Structure formats: structure tokens, C-alpha cells
Image (spheres, grey):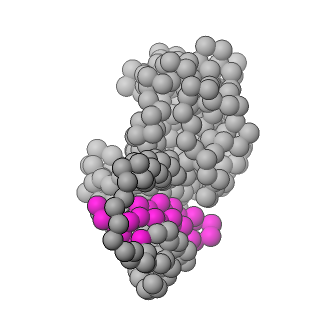
Amino acid sequence: MRADFVLLCYYSIAHRAPRAAVWFCKNSRRLFFRLSGRSLGGNAGIVLLCNKKMAVGRFYGHRRESGGPGVRTQGAAREQADAAERERQQMNADFYSESFTVKAYECDAEARMTPGAILRRAQQISTDQCDLLGLTNEVYARTHTAFLLAKLAVEFYAPVRAGQCVTLATRPSAPQRAVYGRYTTLCAQDGTVLSAVDSRWILVDTRTKRILRRPPEDMPMPFVQPPVCELDVSLVKGEAQPVAEETAFYTRCDQNRHMNNTYYADIVCDHVPLERIAAHAPARLAVVYHSEVPMGASFTLLRAQTGENGWYFVGTDGEKKHFEANLTLTE
């Protein structure tokens, strides 16, 4: 069977529809799907060419030939059910998505969703997926492990507005030299990619603070796919000068008792000249995390301008750097 179709960025999975995994690669402008399910009667594959507006492609599959009457044994039924469950679990490990309506409190004075709010949503969907796959707080506590964010890059293609219905889709990848990548896209209902987040994580032993190149044996680790897309996470630096003193206040800290990584984006945006960020939306954000800021601790924020609409930031306590960042605004 072969049929032309037009498919938007998100695939709604109905009870009788095939299971689906989908992700968007900005660099190649491709959507990649993997489908399999009973309603198709077998395996099928999709390769789509797309731009930021819409994905268009062809579906290639085959219909299962109807067999003669017969009785399926209980063992065969159980084996098929187990195989379907394994496939479902792997699909959830390869790709996960959630839809939501952008709240007013997630937006700035121009009704644009802030970079910090986008990062908080991206962080939450990664937590939701891990919970679904069994990587829960109980597992981390038992294995004395934690995922820490090492660096990230965000590209903003179009403003995300208050009240807008959007879908967040995330795809984690297998570790490369102890670094776990995760590529997340934020899309409008028509499939337009509004923003993309490339985050790089490390797994650490919470007792020794050492990076683990392999997870503990009793820790499930279902991420096996290669990176589907990567953003530039490099920094443009400059001669930075002090602009403010910042503190890891109670409301900025998470259950790890240090400042949550998403609030660095808020701090950076707050120290761009107000008249510039009000008139020009963010275009790119990159953050490199060097060391945590414990609850109640303070650091000095330094800033340098790297271009007409670009800035470099560094947070330091005088002895060590806590983070570095670039923020670039639209022209």
C-alpha cells in the first residue's frame, strides 16, 4: 500500500493507530518517523522532507495478508503482548511529547514566552519521560546518582505567545563520552517549529561527585539512539565587567538545594539593556554550567557586549566560575 499524505509536526496516536516515533532535525530540515502497529499489519517507515512550516512526504508500508482460520495459543498471545510492550517502552525512550497552553505568567511584557520559561518546560518534559521509563527519584536515591546539566543551547525561531497551544517534543540520545544529549522542540499547532533546545547532561555519583561513564548495574538506562540533531553550544567571549551581585534565593533553588539551571537564563535576560530586549526578541541562548551555586550563596555577574545585539556573561564568586552564557537578540 502506498499513499500520499500531509502530516503536521505532531502525530496523534489513537487506539487503533500505529505506534509512532517522530523527531525534527533543524539542520537537515527533516522529520524522521518510525511506525509499527496492528492497524498497518506490519512494519512501515516514513522519510519526510520539511521546512519550518509543514512536513510533506510519502508513506510506505504493507498490508498483512489475511490468513485462514486458526486459534492462537495463549503462549503465542503472551509473547506477542510482551513484544508489543517492549516496543512501546522503547518508543517512549526514543521520543516523548506533551501539549500545553502557554500561561500568561510564562511570558514577558510583550506577551512572549521567556527563555527561562521555555527551559523550565523542557526540563519538566525530560523529567516526565524519565519517570515514565522508571528513572524516578527513588531510583536516583537508591543508586546515589543524579543527572546534572553541563551545557545547553536554545534557538528561538519565532515568538511563543501567551494563550498559544503548543507541543513540546523531546528525544534523548545514548551517551557519548559520558555526555547524555537531549534534543527538544517547541512547535505550534500547524507544525511550525518555534524553538529548539539542545541540552547536554552528565550522570554523577552524588557521594563522590564523580562523573559516571556507565550507569550502575541496577539503574535502567533506556537511551540508545544516536543524536538526531545538535545545536552549536560554543560561546563567544569578551572582556566582561561586573554589573550585579546575584544570590541563589529560596525561590531560585530546587530539591538539590542549589540554584536551578533555568534561572540563569532569567538572570542573563534581566541584565540585557531593557530597551534592547523589549524591542528585540531573543534569537539564541547558550549556557555552560561550571559549578553549582548553593542555596543562599552569592556570586558576581560580569557582562561584555560581543556585537550589536549580543552579550557574554560570566558568574563567579572570585575563586571559581559558576557559569558562562551568550545571549543574542534578533536584528
Q: Quadrant of residue 167?
A: bottom left
Residue 11 spot, x, y in % from top left? 38, 66
- Residue 136 counted in the magenta span: no
Residue 216 spot, x, y in % from top left? 62, 25
In the image: residue 75, left or right of residue 289: left
Q: Quadrant of residue 120?
A: top left
The residue at the point 61 percent across, 58 percent down is 228
- Quadrant in which the C terminus appears: bottom right
Q: Read off the magenta span.
A: 15-41
Q: Is residue 130 visible?
A: yes
Q: Is residue 242 visible?
A: no
In this rendering, the answer to whether 213 lies above or below 278 is: above
The residue at the point 50 percent across, 41 percent down is 265
Residue at the limit of the structure toward the front, as seen here: 70
The residue at the point 34 percent across, 61 percent down is 71
- Quadrant in which the N terminus appears: bottom left
In the image: residue 154, left or right of residue 80: right
Residue 61 spot, x, y in % from top left? 49, 77
Q: Quadrant of residue 214?
A: top right
The residue at the point 55 percent across, 42 percent down is 222
Counting the numbered discs, the total is: 0
Residue at the limit of the structure toward the top, as seen here: 207
In this rendering, the answer to whether 273 lies above or below 15 is: above
In the image: residue 211, left or right of residue 271: right
- Residue 20 counted in the magenta span: yes
Residue 190 spot, x, y in % from top left? 36, 71
Between 84 and 287, the residue placed more toward the observer is: 84
In this rendering, the answer to whether 281 lies above or below 235 is: below
